[in-house]
Structures are given as C-alpha cells and as structure tokens.
Amino acid sequence: MHVDLAVGARRVARRLAFGAGALLVVAALLAGCGSDARTVAQGPVPHPAASSSAPMVVVPKLVGRRQEDAHRVAARSGLKLRWTGFVGKYGNGRYNIGCVQILRQSPVAGERRPRGAQIAVIEAACRTPNQRPHGVTPGGQPES
C-alpha cells in the first residue's frame, strides 16, 4: 500500500484554509452587526409615530366600560378600537351575551398616541348568562 503524505498534507491544509476563511467571513459578519441599543446619555429610541405629522392624543381608560361606551370614548379621543379577543367560556358563541365590557387594553390609559391609532382590547361578559347554551340539551348532550 502506497501512502502519499504530500497529498494528505495538501488536503489537510485546504480544509484548514477553508475553515479559517469561513471563520473570517463569520467574524466579519458579526463585526458588522450592530444593535440599535442606545446608551443612557443618548436617551430612548424615538417612537416612529412621534415623528409623523399627526397630533398626539392621550389614551383614555377603557377597562371596565361597556363595549358601546368604550367605542364612543375612543372615537371622541380620535382613536379606534381593535378587538383582539373575548375571554371566558361565554365567548364560544353558544350563549347570548347582552352585556360586554372591556377587560384589558393596550396601550394603557394615559399614554400618548397619534390621532387615528388603535387601542387593542380584550372583552369579557359583564355577568353570567342565566340560560343554557344554544345547541345543547339540559343533560349536556348536543341537540340532534
């Protein structure tokens, strides 16, 4: 069996050169990556909407208000409501819910947003319905 050490050494050198080249490329990419973190002296990153020409408005407190009232208050402030969910088992569509109120909102009351921005809300039933769900028998079985 004939072993050519020169061929083996060249292969090892090529692999090392390729590995070193790849390492240099990765190092260059990482060095070029920066963060947009700012130091305390520079202050916080400005909000992109703050630079727009829309006037800023204060977000009203909507938590605890009924749905209709919350829409009216948000519209009067120049903001829109965006419904993001309904919590509890009464949100499954099998109950007639007569009263819905705001459980959570984002952004919170008191923050400033540009006129026309949205307030995301999660809703809940004001009270427990006094009825059985639609499509279910008194025994809890689906109606046929």
Image (cartoon, rainbow, N blue to C red):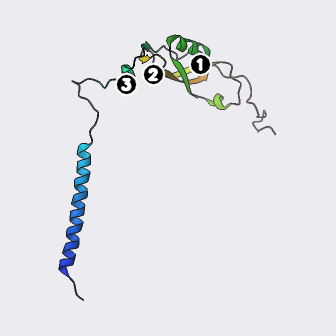
* Displayed quadrant of residue 87: top right
Tell me the tag on residue 48: 3
* Displayed quadrant of residue 94: top right
Q: If you read the primary sequence from the N terminus, does the residue marked by circle 3 or circle 1 appear first? A: 3
Q: Position of residue 28 (x, y in %)?
A: 23, 49
Q: If you read the primary sequence from the N terminus, does the residue marked by circle 2 or circle 3 appear first? A: 3
Q: Position of residue 24 (x, y in %)?
A: 22, 54
Residue highlighted by disc 2: 107
Residue type for callout 1: Gln
Q: If you read the primary sequence from the N terminus, does the residue marked by circle 2 or circle 1 appear first? A: 1
Viewer-proximal residue, 77 or 69? 77
Which-is-in-front pick, marks 2 and 1?
2
* Displayed quadrant of residue 132: top right
Q: What secondary structure is found at the residue carrying circle 3?
A: helix
Label 3 packing within 10 angstroms: few (<14), some (14-19), many (20+): few
Residue type for callout 2: Pro
Tell me the tag on residue 93: none
Label 2 packing within 10 angstroms: few (<14), some (14-19), many (20+): some
Residue type for callout 3: Pro
Which-is-in-front pick, marks 3 and 1?
3
Label 2–label 1 contact, CB within 8 A = no
| Residue 97 falls left or right of residue 79 | right
Instruction: Give how far apart the Cα atoms at labels 2 and 1 are.
Output: 17 Å
Q: So how many labels did they put on this image?
A: 3
Q: Position of residue 81 (x, y in %)?
A: 54, 21
For the point 61% across and 15% down, which residue is it? 68
Tell me the tag on residue 101: 1
For the point 26% across and 52% down, which residue is it? 26
For the point 75% across and 31% down, which residue is it? 134
Farthest residue to the front: give it: 53
Placement of 119 over or under 32, stated as above or below: above
Viewer-proximal residue, 103 or 59? 59
